[in-house]
């Protein structure tokens, strides 16, 4: 296909959002915009996985409540997460008597779920849909890397999986942030095999989707207030800016990465935040409030995902990545 | 929401399909309808996971080729599978330079991917989309249960994960099987905790979606030639017929289950086939040919999925399930 960009002519809009984040996340600059700040990342549960699921359930309920809606007025939940078989999303959906579409895009899930929800609303198939995702540092570490109890040292190129979740209520009418277009990503693999260097692995996918977006829409970088990537981190963001610049697109003036801004930079996050919850929290708290207040008029939200598994890495595979972009306008 | 059913007024249609299955599957009655019959379930690969991925890639390519299209004429691939982080779908999508939406619905993935693809095509966002999924007995056994090398005995209520894949090319025009409606499922959990009894776990979800479909559409069972469930197996199918009958809907005359018909019944499949590949193979081979030939006019395809993981089961959770239904008409 020549053009990867789809246009939502009926302007589905995000009429409400909800976010929750852990103590570490809420110490950052984004923290003050988060709706629910946790003092304990166990969130009163017996396991990290159950805490992650509870966070996701909380923001789905929060998005519905903040929109002034009752559950029976919501047509669908589109959600996914990083855990095997997306159990956080599936078990969260069990708490609601609402049709559920499970999606998997790793850390690109926030953009993917918004694009899918917008497609159903734009086409008149649904009136109100919740798009949500989240992640938990401890559940991700023990599934993808090592049990925390082992106390393994983290290499300098690594990122810190965000403990948090974000949800958006997308409707066919009402006051909110309009979803006007989306550029769905292709799977891009530059042969990176270092599972501690997600930023480097995902940057080419982000570059591919951003270039496809501007090529397809014929827009200029200047048409946007921000190009926000999901969780490339500091290193990945530098690589992205180099890759796009090499192709003649200079995004450096307006590019910001959710992983780069979510934490106060101290020693152990190294390159910054990551995880599906990273862009979900930043978009649905900080960015949404700036869009609603009008201080941001139009942004390109590009959530990035690394589509590896411990099995694929164990079998010597490199890390295929993807990035989905959605255009959000006040 | 009162009505879970969405209608695809622009009649997106399946203009071509492609299927592949293992030696055991091709011995069954469905076997002769399968496009590519494997003599070796390793499919020339070094691991079961790579074989599963190769099968999925094969049917995606096959659906495009059988529709007489070139890859650049396809707007999107919607796919998912049973492996952690849906690596089969993600790595298969890496072989194609086509935008990719990853979905996860366990064994309900064929219906979910068709519904999502139909939504994008119906709304004019895409013209041609491939929906595909698959599974592999050996990769599923070692991820969800035990390594085959252990030689664990299988309980009589267990099913046999199908080694196979199926893909459908869904387009906005052309000769094919029309996708006229879909009833998206809710997550239903009746508290079943036996991971060897998926049929019993999934039957309530199938019942919930089928009842919601007939309640929402006001149609009668007689309006359909078949109500085809994904992979409940023999035991699950009996439970489904009881559950719907108790609610005043008798589907027994026209109900058939893909898991029940895919194998010649011999000792070790017990309740029959399962896995995302089960309904994907049966729909895209046998059922598609019967719909195209006109011997089936209208069917309700209800793929069912068990949304558990080894972690959720290990933490004492029951098995939440889901069933998505799509209406297919000649």
Image (tube, coloured by chain):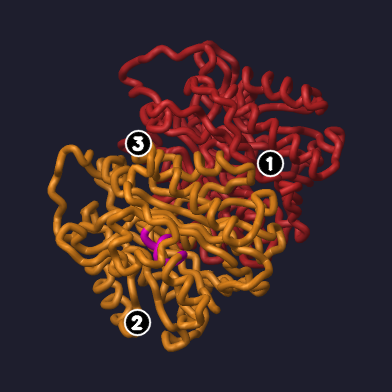
Chain colours: A orange, B red
For label 1, the crowd category at 10 Å Cα-Cα, with few meaning under 14, some 14 to 19 and many 20 or more, is many
Task: Give the quadrant of residue A32.
Answer: bottom left
For label 2, the crowd category at 10 Å Cα-Cα, with few meaning under 14, some 14 to 19 and many 20 or more, is some
Q: Position of residue B64 (x, y in %)?
A: 56, 55
Q: Which mark is residue B325?
A: 1
Q: Is residue A49 left or right of residue B235?
A: left
Given residues B229 and B13, the one toward you in this image is B229
Q: Does the magenta portion include B217?
A: no
Q: Name the residue tied to disc 3.
A: A47
Residue B64 vertical position relative to residue A221 in the rendered view, above or below: above
Which is closer to the viewer, label 3 or label 2? 3
Which is closer to the viewer, label 3 or label 1? 3
Name the residue at the front extreme.
A39
Q: Are marks 1 and 2 in contact (CB under 8 Å)?
A: no
Q: Is residue B138 visible?
A: no
Read off the chain for label 3. A
Q: Are marks 3 and 1 in contact (CB under 8 Å)?
A: no
**Residue drawn where x is 54% and y is 49% of the image:** B62
Q: Name the residue tied to disc 2.
A: A251
Indicate which disc, 3 or 2, sits on the residue closer to the N terminus: 3
How many angstroms separate mark 1 from mark 2 (CA)?
44 Å
**Residue drawn where x is 63% and y is 60% of the image:** A68
First to last magenta residue range: A278-284
Q: Does the magenta portion include A279?
A: yes
């Amino acid at each position: 296909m020549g053009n990867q960009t789809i246009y939502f002519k009926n302007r589905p809009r995000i009429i409400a959002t909800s976010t929750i984040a852990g103590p570490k996340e809420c110490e950052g600059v984004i923290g003050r915009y988060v709706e629910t700040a946790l003092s304990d990342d166990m969130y009163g549960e017996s396991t990290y996985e159950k805490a992650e699921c509870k966070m996701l359930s909380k923001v789905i309920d929060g998005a519905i409540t903040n929109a002034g809606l009752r559950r029976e007025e919501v047509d669908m939940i589109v959600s996914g997460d990083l855990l095997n078989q997306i159990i956080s999303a599936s078990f969260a959906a069990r708490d609601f008597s609402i049709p559920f579409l499970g999606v998997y895009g790793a850390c690109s899930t926030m953009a993917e779920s918004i694009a899918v929800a917008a497609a159903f609303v734009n086409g008149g198939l649904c009136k109100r849909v919740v798009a949500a995702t989240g992640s938990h540092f401890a559940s991700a570490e023990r599934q993808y890397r090592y049990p925390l109890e082992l106390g393994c040292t983290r290499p300098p190129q690594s990122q810190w999986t965000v403990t948090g979740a974000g949800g958006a209520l997308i409707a066919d009418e009402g006051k909110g942030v309009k979803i006007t277009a989306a550029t769905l990503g292709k799977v891009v693999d530059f042969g990176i095999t270092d599972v501690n260097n997600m930023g480097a692995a995902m940057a080419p996918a982000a570059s591919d989707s951003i270039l496809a977006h501007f090529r397809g829409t014929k827009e200029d970088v200047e048409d946007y207030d921000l190009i926000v990537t999901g969780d490339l981190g500091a290193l990945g963001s530098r690589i992205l800016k180099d890759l796009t610049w090499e192709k003649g697109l200079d995004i450096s003036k307006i590019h910001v990465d959710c992983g780069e801004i979510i934490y106060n930079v101290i020693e152990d996050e190294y390159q910054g935040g990551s995880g599906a919850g990273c862009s979900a929290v930043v978009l649905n708290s900080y960015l949404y409030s700036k869009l609603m207040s009008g201080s941001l008029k139009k942004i390109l939200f590009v959530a990035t995902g690394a589509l590896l598994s411990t099995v694929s890495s164990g079998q010597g595979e490199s890390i295929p990545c993807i990035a989905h972009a959605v255009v959000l306008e006040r």
